Structure formats: C-alpha cells, structure tokens
Image (cartoon, rainbow, N blue to C red):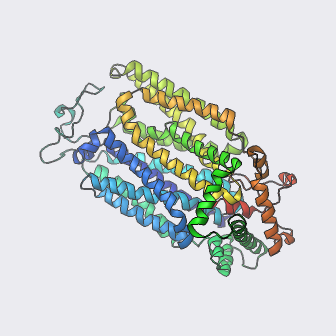
C-alpha cells in the first residue's frame, strides 16, 4: 500500500473504535457501585434493556438524519459535528447524577454514532483509490471489534478500583438472592452502607465512560487536518479545490496524468448524478425529489428484491444473537455459574479477543471463499453453539456451583458462537448490501439497510434482559431458530456476489438498472472527453473487489468512479 493511502484508513478505525467503546455501557451495569447509584437500572431487567437499547435508537435517528447535513456542510464537518455531539453524550454519562443523565447521554451519543456510521464509509469511498476501497469495508468491522476488545478490558481493569464489591466486607453482608456460588448477591436497595459504597469506587464506572471521549477527540482533532471530499467539492462547483485535494491525497503534482484522470472521473460522477436526477425525476426538487428517489426502491421489482435482501441481511445479523451476547456478556456468564464481578468480566474480555481475531479471516479470504459459503457455515456454527449452551443451561441451572466444568463448557461454546459470527455475518452483513445495488440507487438503498440494522440492534438490546429473566435457556433456543432460518434463507434465496459485475447483478435480480447506469455513464464520459483518453480504469463497482486485467474481457466499461459514486450516501 502506498504511503499516501495509509491515512485514509484512520476515519474507519476511529469510528469503529467509538462504536466498539460504546458497547462498554452494558458491562458497567454489572458493577455494584453503579448499582448503588442507580438501583433501578441495576436490578430491573426492563430498565436495563432500555438503557442499552436507547443507544441504538439514537443511532437509528442519527443515521437517517445525517444525509442532508453531510451534503450541505460537507462530509468533513459532518464528522466533526458528530464528534461534538458524542462528547456531550459521553460527558452526560460520565457525570451522571441520576438515571435521566444516563438515558439522555446514551441517546445523544448514539445519535452521533449513527451519524458516523453514515458519513465515515461515504468519506472513505470518496477519497480512497479503488485498489483499497474494498478492504476498508472489512477494516471498519475489524476496527469495531478492536473497540469492543479495548472496552471490555478497560471495564475489567477499572472495576477493581476500591475492590469488586460495594461493601468492603463483601458477600458476607449481602442479603440478595443466593446465586450459583451459594453466596447472597448484592441488593442495591438494602446492601449499600449508610455513607455509600465503602468498597468499590465510583471511578470504576465513571472513568470508562469518560474515556470514550478520547477516541472522539482524536477523530475530531484529526479531521481538522484532513481534506474535504473532492467529490463534495466538485458537487459544489469548487473544481480547482477538488483538483488540489486529489493531488494532495495521491502525493502527486496537480498536472500529473493520474491526478488529472481521477479529477475527470470525479467530475464525470457528479455529472452522472445530475443527469440521472434530471432523467428520472424531471421538475422535482427538495423533499419531493428525495421522496421520489426512495419510492423507486419499492416500486421496481428488481430493486425491491435487492432492498429486501439487504434489509433481511441486517435483520438476521442482529437476530442471530450476537449483540445479546456482547451487550450482556457479564450477565450471560454469571448465569453459567461464573462470578458476576470478576471471573465473568474476565471471560467477557476473552469475547473481545475472539471477536477481533476471527474477523481477520474475512479480511483476507472473503473473496476467495465467497459470501454464501461463509454465511451458511457461520449460521450452522452459531446454531450448534446456541443449542449446546441451551442444553447446558437447562440441565445445570442452579447447579453450576457443584458442576463448574459444565459452566466452562457453556463459556467455550459462547466463544465458538462469537468466532462463527466474526468471520461470516459480521463483515458480510455490511459487504453484501453494498454490492447488490446499482450505482444510481445505492446511496439511498444503503441508508435504508443501515437504519434497519440500528433498529434491529435496538430491539435486541431492549428485549434481551427480559428474555434472559423470563425464559432463561429459551433465549438460546430463540436465537438458534433464527440461525436455522438464516442458513435456509442464504441457501435458497441469496445469490453469490463474489466478483460479479453490476450487469450480472441485473440478470440475478431480473432488471436492467445497472446496464442503464453504465450507458448513462458512457455518455457522460464522452461528453467531458474522459473516454477519449484511453486510460480509463475499470472496476466492478463492488465495494470489495476491483476488476483484474483478465476480467476486463467481460465488456464492463464503466469507470471506477461509478462505483465510488455509488458507495456514497449523499441525499
């Protein structure tokens, strides 16, 4: 990778880090000092579900609302606005004096995360060369797992501040229900010393929440030194600025042939957007134009089939149970007989390691093994893990203290579940939707599929504590059923998209959306003199693969910028 391209990966890493670090909010719910300050959140499964779920609800709203912001104020400033909002939300949580602070802070921070989930991939696709654009999709998922890993171990380390129990005398003074370790558990209404916790300190949960601000500041300050998107500049008529940005990004002279070629391609993409809008939506502007563009996704059968696959993919990505495990890992491991304050948090940290390590194969081998194969194998692996954990939980419920080996066996299959998700439905859940839409519709379609992911994320975060409390091991059976449905859905209804051009996607989905886009782009290229140069670079416009020399013979002639344009989310 050329040195000039390395910096393009940083927004993905920072955004992923923020998303991952936000997941530590559920881990601190298990700390007893937090319970002493917010007893209702600590002890009420429904409230706990809302605390976790409100973040995803905010992210859903943020993702949907950010399109006009990114288009009007630029991708760069949109990220900086999101960072500012995130800092406010994190500060409210870290300094919370009552549960209202926690709820408000989670929603506000979630809004910022949703904005970043929209604008960061868009910014990356507009400043990155095609040879690394595909890897950035998987890299973003990898960076999220790194953020989760860091947050888990921060939680584990900080929960020792002052001890692991609210009362310095420990469980001997507790009056709550007897747990699997044959000790009374902490009751936040009865077991808090008169002067407050004299064991575990507030810093055990306030510092981890405050530390979320650090990667946000790095991203916000770093973006001050990043350029505007050249495509956004071109769309605003600032062509010379766009040329200088391309020159800076590629570390070449503005007069260099490669820089001029890329600049012309960006100009072609902007003209392509204008021509597409004029052709499909004559006379429409503003809200009416936006509504018509979204409505087409539901009116044309081929487009609706693609949209359905994208949304169902996001639905299943959440309903396999991944975030039920990640968000509530301390509770899950406690129910398998591990100590709720120490051992279960240690086991939770291993979840982050497994998640991170097993995402790497997707980055390296996704294009070799294909999407369908990895999705089906991953679904079966998760199905098997859920069934075994359910069987262990059903047989040894309340008996783990005398059967510790059974509890650790359950923990092992939780790790196997995480591994199977990490190389399959984790990264592919984002890759596949980015590949199946034609260039002219991809931005709007992706905004819908992304918001579907956040909404399903919210549902899972909200429902899981109640499910664990009310149906116990049935929670795993519930997710196992969905894993079976996932396997069958992929087997019978999901096409393989590896190395397919958009023309081939038209055959799969029985419409000609991409062929029409290709013809329109050809006209634009001829008009601005781009095709005459004979140096046009080719691309499948897939977010994961570029066309090789051998693949050029398939006749696909759209310039790589069509794919770049399609990867954006401008509204």
Residue 94 % position (x, y): 31, 57
Residue 477 % position (x, y): 48, 27
Q: Nearer the viewer, residue 272 or 547?
A: 272
Looking at the image, residue 212 sits to the left or right of residue 141; the answer is left
Q: Nearer the viewer, residue 327 or 296?
A: 296
Looking at the image, residue 415 sits to the left or right of residue 488; the answer is left
Residue positioned 62% across, 53% down in the render: 137
Query: For residue 192, which quarter of the picture?
Result: top left
Compared with residue 8, is residue 34 higher up or lower down, i.e. above or below? above
Q: Is residue 358 visible?
A: no
Residue 292 % position (x, y): 62, 61
Residue 318 % position (x, y): 51, 41
Task: Count the numbered circles shown.
Answer: 0
Residue positioned 38% across, 55% down in the render: 107
Q: Quadrant of the N terminus?
A: bottom right
Residue positioned 72% across, 52% down in the render: 545
Compared with residue 1, is residue 242 higher up or lower down, i.e. above or below? below
């Amino acid at each position: 990778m050329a040195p000039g391209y390395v910096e393009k990966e940083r927004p993905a890493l920072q955004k992923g880090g923020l998303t991952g670090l936000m997941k530590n909010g559920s881990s601190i719910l298990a700390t007893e000092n937090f319970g002493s300050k917010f007893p209702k959140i600590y002890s009420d499964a429904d409230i706990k579900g809302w605390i976790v779920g409100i973040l995803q609800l905010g992210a859903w709203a943020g993702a949907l609302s950010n399109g006009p912001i990114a288009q009007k104020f630029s991708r760069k400033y949109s990220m900086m606005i999101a960072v500012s909002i995130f800092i406010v939300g994190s500060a409210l949580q870290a300094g919370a004096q009552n549960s209202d602070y926690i709820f408000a802070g989670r929603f506000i921070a979630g809004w910022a995360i949703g904005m970043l989930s929209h604008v960061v991939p868009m910014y990356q696709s507009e400043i990155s060369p095609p040879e690394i654009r595909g890897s950035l999709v998987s890299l973003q998922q990898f960076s999220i797992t790194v953020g989760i890993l860091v947050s888990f171990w921060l939680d584990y380390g900080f929960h020792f501040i002052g001890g692991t129990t609210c009362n310095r005398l420990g469980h001997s003074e507790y009056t709550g229900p007897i747990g699997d370790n044959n000790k009374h558990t902490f009751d936040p209404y009865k077991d808090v010393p008169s002067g407050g916790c004299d064991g575990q300190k507030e810093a055990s949960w306030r510092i981890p929440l405050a530390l979320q601000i650090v990667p946000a500041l790095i991203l916000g300050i770093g973006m001050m030194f990043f350029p505007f998107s050249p495509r956004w500049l071109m769309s605003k008529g600032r062509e010379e600025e766009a040329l200088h940005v391309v020159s800076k990004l590629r570390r070449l002279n503005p007069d260099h042939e490669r820089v001029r070629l890329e600049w012309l391609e960006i100009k072609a993409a902007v003209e392509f957007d204008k021509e597409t809008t004029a052709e499909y939506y004559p006379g429409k502007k503003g809200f009416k134009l936006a509504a018509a563009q979204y409505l087409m996704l539901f009116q044309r059968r081929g487009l609706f089939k693609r949209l359905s696959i994208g949304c169902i993919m996001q639905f299943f990505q959440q309903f396999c149970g991944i975030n039920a495990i990640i968000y509530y890992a301390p509770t899950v491991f406690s129910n398998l007989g591990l100590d709720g304050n120490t051992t279960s948090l240690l086991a939770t940290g291993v979840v982050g390691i497994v998640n991170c390590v097993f995402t790497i194969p997707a980055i390296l081998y996704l294009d070799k093994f294909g999407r369908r194969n990895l999705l089906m194998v991953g679904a079966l692996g998760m199905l098997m893990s859920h069934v075994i954990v359910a069987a262990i939980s059903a047989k040894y419920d309340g008996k783990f203290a005398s059967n510790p080996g059974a509890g650790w066996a359950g923990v092992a299959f939780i790790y196997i579940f995480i591994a199977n998700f990490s190389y399959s439905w984790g990264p592919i859940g984002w890759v596949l939707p980015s590949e199946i839409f034609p260039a002219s519709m991809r931005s709007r379609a992706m905004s819908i599929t992304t918001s579907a992911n956040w909404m399903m994320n919210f549902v899972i975060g909200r429902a899981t504590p109640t499910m664990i409390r009310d149906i116990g091991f049935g929670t795993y059976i519930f997710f196992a059923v969905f894993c079976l449905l996932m396997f069958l859905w992929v087997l019978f209804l999901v096409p393989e998209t590896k190395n397919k051009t958009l023309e081939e996607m038209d055959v799969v989905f029985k419409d000609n959306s991409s062929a029409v886009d290709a013809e329109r782009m050809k006209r634009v290229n001829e008009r601005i003199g781009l095709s005459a140069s004979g140096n046009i670079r080719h691309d499948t416009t897939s977010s994961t693969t570029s066309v090789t020399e051998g693949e050029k013979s398939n006749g696909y002639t759209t310039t790589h910028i069509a794919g770049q344009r399609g990867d954006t989310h401008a509204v």
